Amino acid sequence: MTLIEKAAYLKGLADGLKLDKETAEGKLIGALIDIVGDLANAQADTDEDLQYLNDYIEEIDEDLGSLEEEIYDLEDDDCDCDCCDCCDCCDDEDEDDGFEITCPSCGEIIVPLDIDEEDLVCPHCNEKLIYEFSDEE
């Protein structure tokens, strides 16, 4: 039973009791039943508005998903490939780039992609790094 139906039921009960609306008690009960009806109607309106907004948000979410796929050229997230540019299924962490260096000046961890023993510089603090390269793996 909805709130509107419950409010109508209460109004019917009050009408069946044939309350004297001229007495203080009768006026009070009549006013309370009217307020209950108004609140039930307001709640129904709020529920209707909420449903409309939920539907609208779902439409926006779907549109945004389509737009993201188009802009970022995303394919299916359930891709079973090993490593490609078509999805986010492969993490760069799985790739072994070689080694990491901790900068002694700023403490940042650096993963040098282009290794130049003569000119190895921290990209965070621009401190020249001295690192001994060995042939061991």
Image: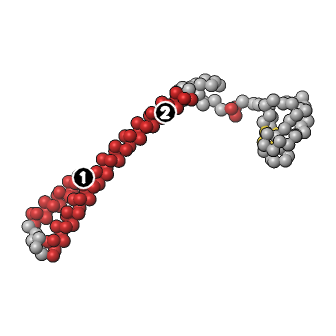
Total numbered labels: 2
Tell me if 23 is positioned left or right of 68 in this view: left
Q: Position of residue 133 (x, y in %)?
A: 90, 33
Between 114 and 15, the residue placed more toward the observer is 114
Q: Secondary structure at mark 2?
A: helix
Q: Position of residue 78 (x, y in %)?
A: 54, 28
- Residue visible at 63% across and 24% down in the picture: 84
- Residue visible at 15% across and 61% down in the picture: 11
Residues at marks 1 and 2, CA–CA distance in whole angstroms: 36 Å
Tell me if 135 is positioned left or right of 60 in this view: right
Q: What amino acid does circle 2 point to?
A: Gly
Q: Position of residue 123 (x, y in %)?
A: 79, 39
Residue matched to label 1: 2
Q: Position of residue 73 (x, y in %)?
A: 56, 26
Rendering quarter of residue 124:
top right
Res. 65 mark:
2
Q: Earlier in the sequence, mark 1 or mark 2?
A: 1
Tell me if 41 is positioned left or right of 77 in this view: left
